Image: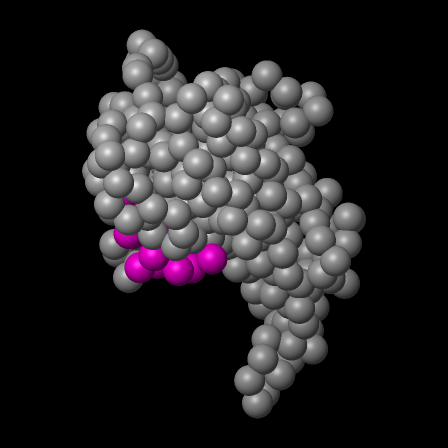
């Protein structure tokens, strides 16, 4: 399923990360493989590493979260490798999150030309990411991007917030200082998400929304819960965000995410 609408984006920058379960060399290999696939399959004017494409329209964060051998089960194959990657898409202009996905790649279980099974699995992941972005509109000619005019803050609160925090219609709007603290929490949540700290990201997004209810924060909650494969809770969070009268652009993102999540439930 598509994770975003990429038709209006003309350039993409990649950042590959890893954690204790994977090596830095595998992250670099993943970045290179995905870059090549996107250049082949997408219509972006520019595709490259973040350091070289820092002003790109969209940023693609790739975080290798797990690497394993064997494939599991009774008939374990030591030549079969599995690589899990968290994908996060961010608008390069306004830094709002666009979508998340978890991609799992598995090697063939056979050594081909002395190629490491992990390298084979990374190629599978790169293909899957390119296909995902193709379904999300990265292929074909680019269309003009129309930025909506600024809008007031979020609409009235409409009940409990999934997985932390609550609202009531009588709650006064947050003052500027509170809003700034909430924005800082939201930005911190994004950084946690880029590093695949899903629990940390979720906590910060929930704190931001509890402090200054905003459909942007709840959409980020929805994306993080989806990355954790908590499908029902993710749907609830996106539905809550949709009920808060979000701007048209955000409403479109929420609707696309809900369509994807509801097919996974």
Confirm whether residue 255 shows in the render: no
Most prominent secondary structure in the magenta stretch? helix
Measured as percent of width and height from the top left, residue 14 is found at 61, 33
Measured as percent of width and height from the top left, residue 189 is found at 55, 40
Residue 233 falls inside the magenta stretch: yes
Measured as percent of width and height from the top left, residue 231 is found at 35, 58
Give the residue displayed 61% in from the left and 65% down from the top: 82
Position of 51 with respect to 185 (left or right) is: right
Camera-side residue of 44 and 16: 16
* Quarter that holds the C terminus: bottom left
Give the residue displayed 64% in from the left and 35% down from the top: 15
Position of 117 with respect to 166 (left or right) is: right
Give the farthest residue toward the top.
Answer: 149
Give the residue displayed 78% in from the left and 48% down from the top: 25
Point out the stretch of residues depicted in magenta: 228-240
Camera-side residue of 220 and 181: 181
Residue 104 vertical position relative to residue 176 in the rendered view, above or below: below
Give the residue displayed 57% in from the left and 89% down from the top: 74
Give the farthest residue toward the bottom.
Answer: 74
């Amino acid at each position: 399923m598509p994770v975003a609408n990429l038709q209006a984006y003309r350039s993409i920058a990649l950042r590959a990360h890893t954690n204790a379960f994977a090596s830095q060399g595998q992250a670099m290999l993943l970045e290179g493989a995905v870059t090549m696939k996107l250049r082949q399959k997408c219509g972006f004017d520019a595709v490259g590493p973040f350091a070289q494409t820092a002003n790109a329209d969209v940023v693609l964060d790739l975080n290798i979260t797990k690497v394993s051998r064997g494939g599991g089960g009774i008939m374990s194959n030591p030549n079969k490798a599995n690589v899990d990657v968290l994908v996060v898409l961010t608008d390069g202009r306004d830094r709002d999150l666009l979508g998340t996905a978890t991609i799992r790649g598995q090697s063939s279980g056979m050594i081909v030309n002395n190629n490491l099974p992990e390298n084979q699995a990374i190629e599978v992941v790169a293909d899957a990411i390119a296909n995902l972005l193709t379904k999300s509109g990265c292929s074909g000619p680019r269309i003009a991007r129309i930025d909506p005019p600024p809008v007031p803050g979020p609409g009235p609160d409409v009940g409990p917030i999934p997985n932390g925090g609550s609202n009531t219609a009588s709650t006064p709007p947050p003052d500027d200082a509170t809003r700034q603290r909430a924005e800082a929490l939201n930005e911190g949540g994004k950084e946690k998400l880029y590093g695949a700290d899903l629990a940390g990201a979720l906590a910060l997004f929930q704190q931001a929304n509890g402090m200054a209810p905003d459909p942007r924060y709840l959409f980020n909650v929805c994306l993080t819960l989806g990355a954790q494969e908590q499908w029902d809770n993710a749907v609830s969070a996106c539905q809550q965000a949709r009920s808060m009268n979000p701007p048209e652009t955000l409403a479109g993102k929420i609707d696309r995410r809900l369509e994807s999540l509801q097919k996974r439930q």
